[in-house]
Image (cartoon, grey):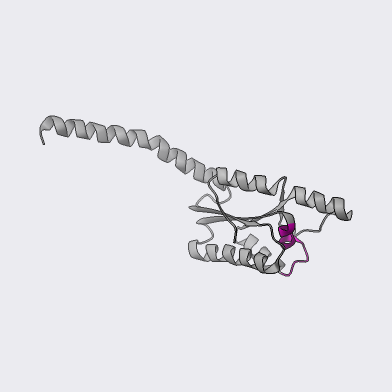
């Protein structure tokens, strides 16, 4: 290779690295914004639950637990989003309450759809009593959309 070719190649490589720097910084910022309470997370998973079957609820909890074991609680951000009949997992009397509480301590977030809660209240005259760790979001499916826009992968076990 002649000297001019080496100079042109080096210049192109240098310019390419400068062009990629803002993209790398933007990706890093987007990851940090995805789960501000998990600044070191490298993986972002939202588990969707819209089924009241206790086996499905247990499966979602098992998946969350397995993700924490596989990646470590600091390297993975997990959020369980419940709506429709799936909110049963977050009722204060649910048989899996102790496991939900344990996962919360390890950093898993549990969201419950406010629209579903409003519907239950309208139909029964009483708002369901929930696990105090449940975070009410206005629209469960809308929250899933927000999470995907922030870099989460949606999984429906």
Q: Residue furthest left?
A: 2
Screen quadrant of the C terminus: bottom right
Which residues lie in the magenta part? 85-95
| Residue 85 occupies quadrant | bottom right
The reply, left or right, for residue 117 in relation to residue 135 is right
Instruction: Give the vertical position of 31 relative to 124 (above or below).
Output: above
Asked whether residue 131 is drawn in magenta, I would say no
> Which residue lies at the image location 71% right of the left edge and 59% below the top edge?
86
| Residue 102 occupies quadrant | bottom right
Quick one: 49 or 75, which is closer to the camera? 49
> Which residue lies at the image location 57% right of the left edge and 48% below the top edge?
35
The location of residue 120, given as percent across then percent down, is: 82, 54
Screen quadrant of the N terminus: top left
Asked whether residue 89 is drawn in magenta, I would say yes
The reply, left or right, for residue 115 in relation to residue 103 is right
Marker count (numbered): 0
The reply, left or right, for residue 136 in relation to residue 22 is right
Quick one: 112 or 115, which is closer to the camera? 115
> Which residue lies at the image location 57% right of the left edge and 64% below the top edge?
63
Instruction: Give the vertical position of 95 relative to 91 (above or below).
Output: below
Q: Residue furthest right?
A: 125
The location of residue 153, given as percent across then percent down, is: 54, 51
The location of residue 51, given as percent across then percent down, is: 69, 60
């Amino acid at each position: 290779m002649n000297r001019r070719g080496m100079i042109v190649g080096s210049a192109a490589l240098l310019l390419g690295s400068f062009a990629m720097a803002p993209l790398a910084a933007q990706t890093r910022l987007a990851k940090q914004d995805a789960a501000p309470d998990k600044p070191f997370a490298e993986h972002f998973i939202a588990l969707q639950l819209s089924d009241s079957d206790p086996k499905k609820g247990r499966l979602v909890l098992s998946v969350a637990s397995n993700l924490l074991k596989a990646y470590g609680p600091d390297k993975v951000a997990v959020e369980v989003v419940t709506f429709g009949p799936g909110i049963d997992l977050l009722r204060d009397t649910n048989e899996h309450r102790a496991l939900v509480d344990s996962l919360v301590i390890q950093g898993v977030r549990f969201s419950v759809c406010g629209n579903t809660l409003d519907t239950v209240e309208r139909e029964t005259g009483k708002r369901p009593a929930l696990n105090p760790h449940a975070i009410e979001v206005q629209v469960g499916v809308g929250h899933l959309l927000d999470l995907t826009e922030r870099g989460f992968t949606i999984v429906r076990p």
